[in-house]
Image (spheres, grey):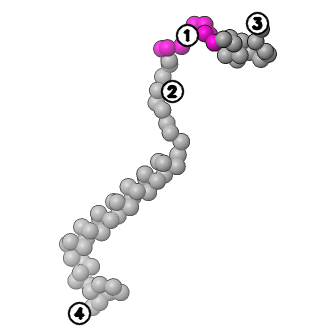
Amino acid sequence: MTTGILFPQETIFSTWFGVLSVFVALNTVMYVALAIAKILPKVDPREWLPRRYERAQSRSIHPEVAEGRSGTPQA
């Protein structure tokens, strides 16, 4: 009987140990993918589409500032 470092060789090459090792490998890959997805900035696909609710005119109390013009609003 040949022994491995921690388990006997029969245990390492058994079916249940192989299934368990595949489960652990997939679980590790899934958690790495989730960790990377959490680090990356959030992607909103609605930003890629044109907005239907944009107004033709600004309804701000400071329309010059809202339209991107520089300067102070006039009273």
Q: Which of marks 1 and 4 is nearer the N terminus?
A: 4
Local secondary structure at mark 3: loop
Per the model, the C-alpha gap separating discs 3 and 4 is 94 Å
Q: Position of residue 75 (x, y in %)?
A: 76, 6
* Kind of residue indicated by mark 3: Ala
Q: Which contiguous range is marked in magenta?
A: 52-60
Give the amino acid type for the residue marked by disc 1 in the picture: Arg
Mark found first going from the N terminus, 1 or 2: 2
Q: Which residue lies furthest to the left in this view?
A: 15
Mark 1–mark 2 Cα distance, whole angstroms, equals: 17 Å
Element type where label 2 sits in the image: helix
Numbered label attached to residue 1: 4
- For disc 3, the marked residue is 75
Amino acid tagged 2: Glu
Asked whether the residues under the numbered discs 3 and 4 touch, taking CB atoms below 8 Å apart as contact, a structural biologist would say no
Residue at x 52%, y 49% (from the top left corner): 39
